[in-house]
Image: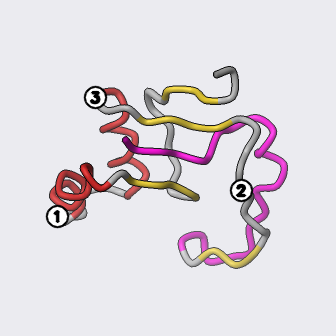
């Protein structure tokens, strides 16, 4: 499809779906929390079937970010970045 792309290294934890066969592996990788979650996701993308949709299926509203400790608005980057990640 010209609307689904295989990911190689995308950093995002905005919106994602995980196939049940990936649960154990992801839990094992995330339990030590040695790195940010989006880095963990990016590191496994080259070795698993991870996909993104364009155009986007969901958007994030502007609002307060606990990580940045301020109000953030990512509206302007949705035209150039992929955010919906599917692990299969």
Closest to the camera, between mark 3 and mark 1, is: 3
Lower sequence index among marks 3 and 1 = 1
Pointer 3 local density, CA inside 10 Å: few below 14, some 14–19, many at least 20: few
Q: Secondary structure at mark 1?
A: loop
Q: Give the magenta range.
A: 67-88
Q: Residue at the location (52% across, 45% down)?
A: 85
Closer mark to the observer between disc 2 and disc 1: 2
Q: Is residue 80 above or below residue 38?
A: above
Secondary structure of the residue carrying numbered label 2: loop
Query: Is the residue under label 1 in contact with that under label 2 (CB below 8 Å)?
Result: no
Q: Which mark is residue 73?
A: none
Drawn side of residue 12 relative to residue 18, left or right: right
Judge from the rendering whether residue 72 lies leftward or rightward of residue 40; answer left or right: right
Density class for disc 1 (Cα within 10 Å; few <14, some 14-19, many ≥20) is few
Query: Mark 3 — residue?
Result: 47
Q: Earlier in the sequence, mark 3 or mark 2?
A: 3
- Where in the figure is residue 71, as x and y percent of width and height? 74, 74
- Could you classify mark 2 by the number of other residues whose Cα lies within 10 Å: few (under 14), some (14-19), or many (20 or more)? few
Q: Is residue 75 above or below residue 43?
A: below
Return the mark for residue 32. Answer: 1
Question: What residue is disc 2 on?
Answer: 58
Identity of the residue drawn at 81% across and 39% down:
79
Give the image location of residue 50, x and y in percent. Answer: 43, 36
Cα distance, mark 2 to mark 1? 30 Å
Spatial separation of the CA atoms under disc 3 and disc 2: 25 Å
Where residue 76 sits in the image (x, y, percent)? Answer: 84, 48
């Amino acid at each position: 499809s010209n609307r689904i792309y295989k990911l190689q290294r995308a950093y995002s934890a905005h919106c994602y779906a995980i196939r049940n066969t990936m649960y154990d592996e992801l839990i094992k990788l995330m339990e030590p929390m040695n790195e940010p979650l989006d880095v963990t996701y990016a590191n496994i993308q080259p070795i698993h079937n991870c996909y993104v949709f364009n155009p986007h299926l969901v958007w994030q509203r502007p609002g307060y970010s606990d990580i940045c400790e301020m109000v953030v608005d990512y509206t302007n980057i949705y035209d150039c970045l992929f955010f919906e990640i599917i692990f299969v």
